[in-house]
Image (cartoon, rainbow, N blue to C red):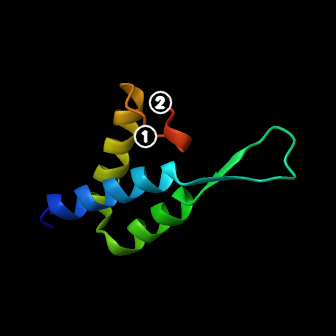
Amino acid sequence: MKLRPYKVALALLAIIMSSYIAVTLPFSLQGIPFTAQSLIVFICAAFLAPTEFTFAIVTYLLLGVIGAPVFAEGTSG
């Protein structure tokens, strides 16, 4: 299977952008944010080949580890 970088880049962008859209639940005591990130991860898993999806997720995690603000509400690793 051939790796399509444009599909991986779009999936990575969708995962990162969905982490910036956060809703704080009013009944939670500590103000835990709820993001659409889990939903986007499952959608990307459904539409990408396993190697493309793995590459997108590993790239996302590496971006967070090096300090890019890609996690929930723009926080870094």
Quadrant of residue 43 within the rendered picture: bottom left
Image position of 74 (left or right of 60): right
Q: Which mark is residue 43?
A: none
> Depth check: 40 or 28 in front?
28
Q: Kindly identify the residue that appears in the image at 37 percent across and 49 percent down.
A: 57
Q: Kindly identify the residue that appears in the image at 48 percent across and 28 percent down.
A: 77
How many numbered tags mark residues here? 2
Q: Are marks 2 and 1 in contact (CB under 8 Å)?
A: yes
Query: Could you tell which of marks 2 and 1 lies nearer the N-terminus?
Result: 1
Image position of 39 (left or right of 8): right
The residue where tag 1 is placed is 70
Q: Amino acid at mark 2?
A: Ser
**Vertical placement of 39 versus 23: above or below?**
below
Q: Amino acid at mark 1?
A: Val
Q: Secondary structure at mark 1?
A: loop
Quadrant of residue 32 within the rendered picture: top right
Q: Kindly identify the residue that appears in the image at 31 percent across and 69 percent down.
A: 48
**How far is mark 2 from mark 1, CA to CA?**
6 Å
Image position of 39 (left or right of 52): right
The residue where tag 2 is placed is 76
> Depth check: 63 or 20 in front?
20
The picture places residue 23, in percent across and down from the top left corner, at 66, 54
Q: Residue furthest bottom?
A: 47
Q: Kindly identify the residue that appears in the image at 37 percent across and 31 percent down.
A: 68
> Depth check: 62 or 33 in front?
33
The picture places residue 56, in percent across and down from the top left corner, at 31, 52
- Which quarter of the rendering shows the N terminus? bottom left
The picture places residue 30, in percent across and down from the top left corner, at 81, 37
